[in-house]
Amino acid sequence: MRPFTFVRAIDADQAVAGYAREPEWAMYLGGGTNLVDLMRLGVAEPGLLIDVTRLPYDRVEEAPGGGLRIGAAVRNSDLAADPAVRRDYPVLAAALLAGASGQLRNQATVGGNLLQRTRCGYFQDVTKPCNKRRSGSGCPAVEGDHRNLAILGHSEHCVATHPSDMAVALTALGATVHVRGRAGERIVPMPGLHRLPGDEPDRDTVLDPGDLITAVELPPLELAARSRYRKVRERASFAFALVSVAAALDAEDGAVRDCRIALGGVAHVPWRAEAAEEELRGGPATDDAFRAAADAELAAARPLRDNGYKVPLARELIVRTLAELRDGTGADASGGTP
Amino acid sequence: MTTDIERVTGTALDRVEGRDKVTGLARYAYEYPADDIAYVVPVPAAIARGTITGIDPGDALAVPGVLTVLSFRNAPPLAGNDPELRIFSSDRVSYRGQMVAAVVADTLEAAAEAARLVHVGYDAEPHDVLLRPDHPEAYVPEKVNPSFPAVSEQGDVEAALGDAAVTVDTTYTTPAYHNNAMEPHATLAVWSGDRLTAYDSNQGSSTARDMLAAAFGLEPGQVRVVSPHVGGGFGSKGTPRPQIVLAALAARAVGRPAKVALTRQHMFAVTGYRTPSIQRVRLGADASGRMTALAHEVEEQTSTLKEFAEQTAVPSRMMYAAPNRLTTHRVVALDVATPSWMRAPGECPGMYALESAMDELAVACGLDPIELRVRNEPEEDPESGLPWSSRNVVACLREGAAWFGWAGRDPAPGVRRDGRWLVGTGVAASTYPARRRPSEATARATADGRFTVRIAAADIGTGSRTALTQIAADALGVPPERVDVRIGDSALPTASLAGGSMGTASWGSAVAMACVRLRERLDGAGGEVPEDGIEARYDTADDIKADAAYARHAFGAQFAEVRVDPGTGEIRVPRLLGVFAAGRIINAKTARSQFIGGMTMGLAMALLEESVPDAEFGGFLNHDLAQYHVPANADVANIDARWIEEDDPHLNPMGSKGIGEIGIVGTAAAIGNAVHHATGVRFRDLPIRPDRVLDRAPQIGGRNL
Ligand SMILES: Cc1cc2nc3c(=O)[nH]c(=O)nc-3n(C[C@H](O)[C@H](O)[C@H](O)COP(=O)(O)OP(=O)(O)OC[C@H]3O[C@@H](n4cnc5c(N)ncnc54)[C@H](O)[C@@H]3O)c2cc1C
Ligand code: SF4
């Protein structure tokens, strides 16, 4: 690992100013569960680490306009256990608990979780080419190992997926991300924080270098009280999603009044299923309608040689999760332990 | 061994070093202290095949604290007969990840950083790292491990298959697997003049000593290997691995003690793995299910450095009666690291294929799979004609069936549903040879009423130190608290490896006999222990040479219940039961751990584990534990192991068979068979992943939606 300087910032101004002094080499450090791994692998080579976990962003509180404001330094386990989250946004608690392991969640922060990098194996091995790591070096995953990679929104330059479960729930909920940059505060909506790879796969998000995430805000959203997260992976816990779905449904008298759907494990971004939502709103809350909605969303899917299974899997998860929300069934929302 | 106190073998004695382990007092290789340690980080090759054209250590040497950069340019030549251990001996690269250089530095951080700054130039050549059917370079090796003929033939298989009323002809594949012990391969090497001490993580300190001595041209007496505690090996620490040579080389180069611990990623390159396999099994039976023909043909890989031919079809030579039989092995030397030992080499992959095919034959015959196996029970070892020392596979199947609730099982596949799950059950048999190797031990009585047993045995987490304590206590007729067992040090009497499930049988034989000798001498001395103690030594070499000719194997039966969600491809295993007949069980607690540990690894083989080769760049892609999935707690639900006590007089003084490996044999087949019972679809390529289930979902009856 490259030698680096470590500083601990106590307020946002100090953190942002610290970054600005070493823009080439500085990186913010959250829980370090992703960044430190990448440093050991030589994928990230910061010369200056600015620890942002001691900033005063460690609380979950009611937002001024209703909803919840979640500090960027809140640990994943604390967020999952927060009573307001569990009551009003169960999809978020479930998504968090479906991610990583207990130890990792105790360490991981909201800011770091949003900005964690892809798990594509080539990206994590500096002895191999990868456009995301080294622009223009090529994407071996297109022809190589891509069984767990994207089916939607990918480009010839990169077919990676965004690995976060939490971000899928936030995307479904329409969260906003509060960012402090050199030019002051700004608000980035989700979806909208992460970007599709296009011909710049090295850029995961719309943030600029030095932008500090200070909080995530959840809008007041009544239907979120009926929401859930369902994740399919190769082992029963402690693995990244093959495909996951975050969904909320407000259905009355057999009709869909409103819904939110987002998919994980399918794209370079947590994928908001807008086409499916569109298809559903105002229509019947029947299995057939759910299927048609899933098909509408997945019509855009372009699976690679070895990940075609993700299309029927995503479809199945959308349909089942909506049906379970409608019927109030299927308690094993997070994992699928019998 | 008549005693007036109760025997302790067979009881669930707690691990004698358990407290040391949970309190952190037990010291593992990398934790040994020494003055002025230098740290070593190896540089892995970045190509799969070719020649090193240049090594530029300039930037690495410029890192503060770096002492030297070792490579074929400056490293002294090593001797010995294992090319995987003759590191830095040439400019050739035989596989991606092979050690091509190493940095030695004052700190681990400096060594790690500098290792990335060693600029290695390569002249890469086209490589081939993929085992595939009918590979043009496949050949029949002279022998398969350890010394079986590669091909065996009885009768006329083709004719018998042609005449058979029922036949099965299927091909199964298993991927490469990595042992992934928790403790990485690590060594601290300390030279004192021309004497070398290595604190090392291995499965046999005597073996490691002999290898080190050979590598450095020393007498075995000049080398000492110390390994009292080892955090798992599963075979990957049986054959010494390059880190031990590297540590010694580096320590000599800088004139200081030197430490190496491999990273998990590098372990995937240089510590061995189980070869992938392609296995064709053909079975022929008469209408009543009696087998007339059994053919098991295996293709697997080896490296260009040395031949390692896993004995995958060997269990098919002894498992079932069939007058016509053919077993063959072909290997391909690919641009890969040499495959090596992994828990139950041969039996584990081979029995997966054979026991899956047996299930297919049962279905084809319309027979219960247990009944099919009972009908094909051989009276004697079919190929050698030797009598069984004991063989209780039928008892394991029958008792297991009763415990598991097998009776009344509806054989129809794909018809049981519980909500989103399709439910099925499966069974498979297990086997593993019961062997022993020569070892020496001493037993000493001291005037304080205590006894000390010495043998260079290894406890790699299995509980062997505890088992030997029990064996010694019973042989001496004293409570175990009065016995100290010293193991894990090549300075102790020479012992065989912890491998091939032979450890406790081999060491226990020497320990028991040394203790018997000591008692005799004590009795001769009137029961009085002289002031300066009294000692006896025993070497089992002659006993083992004189062992009568028997076919000695442990047997077992494994039962699995699985649930498959055909809509998501998820598979869960709510229940696993293993029943084993493995002679006398020496420690009920550690034996259970071995059995359920093996079964858990078998579950992983069925559903999770695989090392994915990188066709484009060589090596393995998923070289860490976030990508290479071993089971987590949630994957292992109700898992149980039981055993049938055997009284087999043809084994060793304890009457025991090895138990370290049989637990993994058959599990994957039982699970795969249960998946078929649940879904009606045969998945013949491991692991049975969600994507594989989903790709074949249209064939699965009654989807969810
Ligand atoms: C074995 C393993 C399994 C895992 N499984 C899952 C899983 O199943 N699902 C899942 O969702 N995740 C999983 N994870 C990933 C885990 O969730 C992330 O590593 C974690 O959320 C990252 O948070 P952190 O605080 O540790 O981030 P860090 O590692 O500290 O930082 C990650 C990135 O965010 C940046 N950063 C951190 N905080 C801020 C901030 N406030 N403003 C701007 N930038 C910031 C850092 O500079 C860095 O680039 C797994 C991780 C491991 C190691
Ligand atoms: S998919 Fe993206 S991250 Fe993976 S190798 Fe290609 S460019 Fe790199």
Image (cartoon, coloured by chain):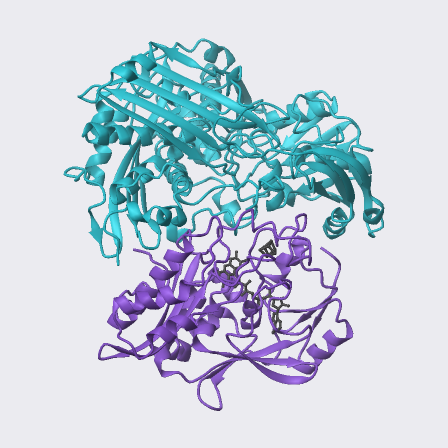
Q: Position of residue B346 (x, y in %)?
A: 44, 26
Position of residue B435 in the picture relative to residue B579 (left or right): right
Q: Colour of chain B?
A: cyan
Between B400 and A142, which is closer to the camera in this rendering? A142
Residue at far bottom of view: A64
**The C terminus of chain B, quarter of image:** bottom left
Closest to the observer: B248 or A203?
A203
Return the x and y of residue B703 as percentages of the image width and height: 26, 53
Residue A165, how many percent across, how many down? 47, 65
**Nearer to us in this view, B578 or A266:** A266
Tell me which chain appears purple. A
Q: Is residue B644 visible?
A: no
Among the 4 quarters of the image, the one containing residue A107: bottom right
Q: How many marks?
A: 0
Q: Where residue A22 sits in the image (x, y, percent)?
A: 77, 71
> Which residue appears farthest toward the left when viewing the image?
B408
Task: Choose between B158 and B77: the one closer to the eye.
Answer: B158
Q: Residue at the spot x=32%, y=40% of the render? A: B671
**Quadrant of the drawing holding the N terminus of chain B:** top left
> Is residue B620 shown left or right of residue B190?
left
Quick check: can you spot residue B361? yes
A269 displayed left or right of B474: right
Q: Which residue is pictured at 61% across the width and 24% down the height?
A: B306
Q: Quadrant of ligand 2?
A: bottom right
Query: Vertically, is A100 above or below A29?
Result: above
Quadrant in the picture for residue A277: bottom left
